[in-house]
Each structure stands twice: as C-alpha cells, then as structure tokens.
Image: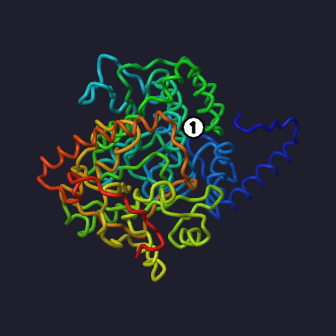
Amino acid sequence: MLLACRVWALSAAGIVTLTLGNIFLTMQVLNGKEELLACGGFSSPKAWTAAMQEGNLTNYLAILREANIVTDDMLCNNKVVCKGVSTRNSTSSSSDTEYMKKSSQAAFMIDDQLGRWDNHRLYKTYDHVYTGPNYRTLSSSAVVCLATQTSVDRLYWLIQAARHWSEPVSIAVFTPDIEYGIARIYFQYLMACFPLIGDRVTVHFTYPKEHPPLQLQLNIQDLLKLCDKPVTVLRELLHHRDYKMMAWRERMAYPQNVLRNVARKNCNTEWVFLIDVDIVAIPNFSRQLNDFLRTSTARGCAKCAFVIPTYEVDEKAQMPRNVTALLQLVRSNKARPFHQKVFVHNQYATNFSLWQSQHNRSATDTVTVSHKVTNFEFFYEPFYVSRDSAPPHDERFVGYGFTRNTQVYEMFVSGYEFFVLSPLFTLHWGMQVKKSRPQWRETQNNKNRKRFEGFKKEILGRYQKDPLGMMKPKRKIIKKSWKNKS
C-alpha cells in the first residue's frame, strides 16, 4: 500500500464515516470540484492540489515524498490520463495508463547494432527509445514542442518541467555506463507512477563511445511501491555508480550541444522551445504560447526568435503564477533575472527593466511582443522559441563554456532578430551565486575557448559578416549594472 497507515479494526459504520470525511475534505481542497481527481489508478492525497498551488521548491520536494501523481485540473483537461474527471478535450482512458505501464516495461531498450553516431563519432544516440501514447497525436496538431536535455542525476526535474506543458516533449538523456541502466529503470518508474509525463513525451539516449551502456538488474515492482518518493528513488538508484566510475564520471565533459540537437531534431513541430530540464514554465504557458505562434506576428516572420524572460526564485518563496506575483518577489529580493549574480552578460540583453516597467503600467494575459533586443552581445544566451530551421548547436563545444551563446551568436549573424515576449516567463528554483570553479571545469572552458577561434572564422566565411567585430583584437569587457538598464 502507498500509505504507511494500517487500519487494524474498524466497524462498518466507522469505515463509512471515515470515507465520507475524506471525500468531503478532498472536495474542499479541490475548491468545490464535483469529482475527485484520480489519475493513473493511484489515489490522490487530499493535500496535493492545495500544496501545488503554493508550489515553492521546498513544498514541491515535500509533495513528491507524500503524493504520487500530478492531478491538477488543468493538466487533466489537457489529455493527461485521468479517471473520474470530466474533461473538455481528453479522450484518454485507463487503457492509456495500462498502455504506458506495459510499453514502458519493454521500452528504453537499445540494440548496439543500431543507433547513430554524431559527426565526430564520439557519441552514439538512440532516438525514440520511448514514445508516449499521445505524442504522435499532439505532434500532428501542435505548433510548438518542448525540447530539453539532462544527465541522469537530474531526471526528477522532468516532473516539474512537464507540469504546465500540455504539448509534446522531447528529452535527450546522457547515459554512459551504468547510468543507462539507471535511466531505463527510473523512466519505467516515472511512466508507471506519473502517467502525466509518459503521456506526451518521447525519450532519447546518448552515450560516449568509451563508456558504452550497461544494464542494471532490478525488480521494477519494488520501486512501484514507492510512487510517493521519486527523489528518494533516484538517489538510491544513483548509488549503483561505484567509486571507480565516479573517478572519471565527475570530470567527464557533458555533451550539452549534442543532446540539445538530439532533443530538438526529434521534435516534429514547426516551432521548438529549447530549455534546460530545471527551467520551469508557469501555468497556462503552453496554451498562451501556442495562441501567439498562430498569430500573424509570429507566422509572418521567417527569422524571429521569441525570448522568454527567465528569473531565479528563492527556493523558499511561493511559485509566482503570473507577472504580478513575480514582480512582488522581485521587489522583495526573492526573485531576480537568471544568472544576474553569476554572469551578467548571460541574460543582460533581454532588458528585464523594460519588461518589468511595462507590466507595472498594464497587465494582460494575451501574449504580445514586449520589445526587440537591440543591444545584442556575444555572451547572450536566452531561452527562446524559434522555428526548427534555426542553426543547430555546434557540437565541437563539449562541457562548460561557449555551448549556448555560440549558437545564439550564429543566429544573430545569419539575420535572426530577437523579440522579448510578454507576459510569459520561466523560472529557475534557487538564487544562484558565484562559486569557485573546480579545475576540471576551468580546463573544459579553456578548451572550448580555443575551439572558438576556429568557430568564429567559419562563421565569418559562412556569412561574410562580423557584426560584433569578433575577428578584431579582443575587447575589454565592461562591467554591467542592472540598475542602470533602461
């Protein structure tokens, strides 16, 4: 049983009374909804919906320990596999849940005689090791797909990343050595315990040539007894990485750009929203974005990238569900632009001050262009939505440094324009601060800096343009101040 309480002896009348009491309390939590939410065949704890409304990181992790499935009404109305809920546009049934359970048991297998190598034959990828029952249908009707990538140790963030995204999701996972076995087991666990994720996702595995995948023999049924503990389950699975593996694993360069390209090119929609797995969307995000991308503003621009402002939020703060709540956190110093303290150039060109000032004057739920990015700089690397025809991420850049900004730079040189959208925004839990870099990370950054010398020459040759003067002698970086931005 999922609950750790044992009922030893109750009269029939007592059982009826207790049941009716629980139903009443649950209905109060659900703000008067007529029917209980119960997805995937698992009962839903009565505090789930109320706690998700608060939604700060501390509560979220606590919720994952106490509850077993996302059951908020918006999600059920967006083709999540739900029972006992009247939905507006969902045709899913309990049979879909069984489909995901059975298919996930057989999925995530790879054949080492198949797969495909990257251009340098350093990494091998297996596309679509799992595809959810609604992924194909959604891909044929949606205009945008969420593409993301992650290492195995951060997979639990997928639950949150998919929470407010009702369109198709494509995720690439780095799976060297035993991490393949861990990923396979953990995905089976997620699909069975969290049908919300498995319903509309497609999964891809990538591993390095020198560390081919290894299986992990484990009884998945034992894990299904712990549907209320996804973070704990992953932590325990990661213990199968022994000290010999970790000696090389922690220093291994993470192929971010290879994985980004894998995730993105496996989306089948015209538009792609490419993010990191720990970037969280606000409620109604995908619906509002879909509506905007169908407007003449978006469809009439062939080389437009639409920037989504991203904020860091204090992990003890309540999740801001709209701009008004976000600005309240900003004023109380519990939210700030992403990477503001770590590396100001990362998001500076977005012009958060202008974006915020516009919302102080007016408020609307309709997505529009707030303003154009007019002060583009080389280290700018926003999270944005663009057509899939945008330049790919250059896969020579592996590990830390020059991975995202070089792709954004090529877009800029090739003629793309960047426009900041409003009122959409995304969140990163936790206020980031500067930390001393380990030597292996600095080594990776230095290697990528040398690779950039060849990259910028290729960009000049490809487009015959050097708008930022990258071929000129190096310029001194001027320290930025967010307060002076207008």
Observer-nearest residue: 151 or 71? 151
Observer-nearest residue: 233 or 228? 233
The x, y position of residue 474, in whole percent, is 28, 53
The x, y position of residue 327, in whole percent, is 54, 71
Q: Quadrant of the N terminus?
A: top right
The residue depicted at 40 percent of the width and 32 percent of the height is: 130
Secondary structure beneath label 1: helix
The residue depicted at 30 percent of the width and 40 percent of the height is: 261
The x, y position of residue 172, in whole percent, is 39, 37
* 239 sits left or right of 268 in the view: right
**Colour pattern:** rainbow
Question: What residue sits right under mark 1 in the picture?
Answer: 193
Observer-nearest residue: 374 or 126? 374
Q: Residue furthest bottom?
A: 361
Amino acid on which the number 1 mark rests in the picture: Cys
- How many numbered marks appear? 1
